[in-house]
Amino acid sequence: METPRLPYETIECDVLVVGAGGAGMRAAIAAADAGCKVTVVTKSLLGKAHTVMAEGGIAAGIGNVDPEDSWEVHFADTMLGGQLLNNWRMVELYAHEVIDRVLELERWGGLFDRTEDGRIMQRAFGAHSWKRLAHVGDRTGLELIRTCQDKMVHTEGVDVCMEYTLTTLLKSGDRVAGAFGYDRNTGRFVAIRAGAVVLATGGWGRMYRFTSNSWECSGDGAAMAYEAGADLLDMEFVQFHPTGMIWPPGARGILVTEAVRGEGGLLFNAEGSRFMLDYDPVKKELSSRDVVARSIYKEVQAGRGTPHGGAYLDVRHLGADYVKRKLPSMYEQFHALASIDITSQPMEVGPTIHYTMGGVRVDPDTAATTVPGLYAAGEAAGGLHGANRLGGNSLGDILVFGRRAGEAAAAYAMSTGPGPDIDATQIAAEQADLLRPLAGDGDGASLGENPYKLHEELQAAMQDDAGIGRTETSLQRALAAIVSLRERSTRMRVAGGRALNPGWHTCRDLTNMLVISEAIVRGAIERRESRGSQWRFDHLEQEVEFGKINFVTRRAGDAMQVVSVPLDPLPERLRSLLERSRFYDPVKLPKGYLTEIAPAAAIPTAGAAGTAEKRPPRAPRKRK
Amino acid sequence: MAVVDQPAPAAAAAPESALTASGLTGETLTLQVLKGVPDGPQTEVTYQVPVVAGMVVLDAVHYVQHNLDTDLACRWNCKAAKCGSCSAEVNGRPVLLCKTRVDDLPAGPVKVHPLKAFPLIKDLVTDVSRNYEINRSIPPFTAAPDDGTPWRIQQRDIDRLYEFRKCIECFLCQDVCHIIRSHDYGDRFYGPRFFVRVASLEMHPKDVIDRRDQTREEGGLGYCNITKCCTDVCPEHIHITDNAIIPLKERVADVQWDPVRFVGRKLFGPRND
């Protein structure tokens, strides 16, 4: 048996939560409330997680502004937005419980904008039937994370390890026994022994060049889960947010919140034409993100783009005072980074990689993965959003399923007792792997590959060949690039030691990103259709067959395997709810098992279902 | 330090990643970064960085990491001035590196140093954990147990809290405050960030806890002599002194120095009210 080369610290807990964004903190609070000793590990300082970047709000069918709204309509909008590939049980739980989670946040001291009669204000958002997003100006994510942070640090039984990176899950037989990694600041190794592990590690935008994601979004959680034998779901679905900054170059990709359009912002091409009227006459600028992003892309391809290759987003007609009150951080962002006053000049925007619908495959009720003792929640998990996520459904997702994961992990840890013993052989192997880029004398960097350069090459390959529009040829090119980069990544070398060495940290981030990139590309190759965020130039239509399956990625020895699994069809009681969406159109139903049964008449009528009641679209309300 | 190579032009065959022109202006920026570890010497290392249109100092630091010095430590996250991670001192002024435009700085070398008021970890990264300890010591938001949600709260009652809640915890105000920076009273003084925190809790219409005595005794509110340096450096433009600290001082004075209450305390002993 191998023994670890270097000493390591050991931490023991009942539940280990990896990640301290909204999902991680909500899971930690839930597990501690259930009586567990919880350790939360975050790569950054507390409160810096990517949740702060969420701006628009939390979607919840409270119906404070539009009384017609309800969880049922929210359910229908989310399913239709996801092109019916969503796990319907997750959506059902989500639409139900997100209302309680919003009120809970308020109970914990979170602020929301108010209606005139003092209730939580809700705003319009893309592809939501009614005004649904509870919000605080355009910094809702910051409010959520600060509120959860304050709640968590004052919850008994939660310890936080800030600026630690976990690199592998430790297993005992089939079961997860904890995780291993290092303290980023000192480089000291650490093993955390836990009865159950919750992955709340967020998404993976960093393998693309133009992304709204921070450096943290390298897919560590999904990569670790994959290595540990868990299933990944629908990895091909990567969301392009239609509006990211495109100029100056350093700011390219930074998010311009959908709340700009929710509050009435309009999109124009370089010829001054409001092009969304042509692409989606019903929802216009507030169409779903996949549609708006593709529309901007098509305008640019047709030669009607702005000077820097995007579209104009205009809020001038809303009035300077209103813009500064409802969109303060957008005003500040353009003022500081682009020297543009959005109250008097239009913004230039274009699609940016924003969110990953795919993720670790979980049980809808418990967030349990296919590996015993391992749970996943938030963006790291897949299933809720199907082929495309609606804006405002992520902040709700992290709260609803963060809590569920925390509770289920606590129950598992308490039922099985303390975690199994840690396997020293596993730790020895991981240490050797982590230390490899530091090997060599003197200036190690000159002897091998620079991890930053490999990262840049991966970003170029993914952006160009597995980006917003894909073909078999481009995807095969991306796959070849990934295979070649993986081979070169074994020769990565960096100068310096283990203490706070960003070059060294990038090595493992890159390894994870290569695993996840391969999963995205292999999934995208298999899905030979265009649906949601997946846009295949060589397969422009939706196919019935692909509307009946999800793709699952898993490890088979050293090879990556993609298999299709049949969708669980909507049960009758939920099927009838689809009609409650204002955007339900039986003729344009996403192709799949519903359209196959009897096209255009797949959904029982309102009378037959007994509960559904179709309402006519309503004229927009005047702003208060 | 290493001689500068111009960055390789974006791959010509790459349609989308080349969509944006490189934006190179042809100028070169001289970046002087204070590198070092706690027990070793700190030395200013000079790097030459090609300037790109609209470049921020964090872009320049990233260029150095990618091309010249992979070991240069710098904390950052969102690169959109929303998380408050990349705090450092540029030409002596505490700023967010991601929000400091190179073309806004005077011509000549740009000096980038770590925050001075906090213990050094490495290069541009400092140990700000003390701030998290202070936060834990402040009683959290607490509503009356029988005050059940959903609540009715009027917008005008929370309007003044908005600017406090904008805080991104970059700790620039803590860094610039002379009570912490020069007098090293970090162990008996909350600092501007946490006076903002206390103010946001004290002014919340649904909060029922009184933090005034603690803010005066443990928080050292009286040490602040309202020089407004904190307000000056705040990247979120929070009026820290005028809207948080001074109203807190008034509230504390009200409970502590009211003459009638003073006599009451003399006669009946101290009590919290």
Image (cartoon, coloured by chain):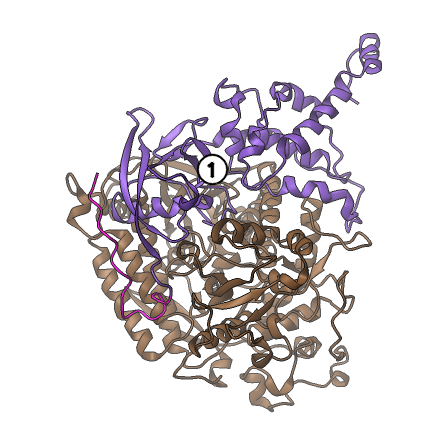
Chain colours: A brown, B purple
Q: Position of residue A609 (x, y in %)?
A: 73, 81
Please, what is the three-letter code of the amino acid marked with disc 1?
Val
Which secondary structure, mark 1? strand
Frontmost residue, A526 versus A207 = A207
- The magenta segment: B1-19
Please give left or right for residue A169 compared with residue A591 in the image: left
Q: Main secondary structure of the magenta part?
A: loop
Which residue is pictured at 73% across the width and 67% down the height?
A: A70
Q: Is residue A494 above or below residue A80?
A: above
Q: Is residue A43 visible?
A: no
Q: Is residue B200 above or below residue A30?
A: above
Q: Which residue is mark 1?
A: B95
Q: Is residue A304 above or below residue A175?
A: below
Name, please, the residue furthest toward the front: B107
Q: Is residue A68 above or below residue A246?
A: below
On the rendered image, what quadrant is the C terminus of chain A found in? bottom right
Dividing the picture into quadrants, the one containing residue A88 is: bottom right
Is residue B18 on the magenta stretch?
Answer: yes
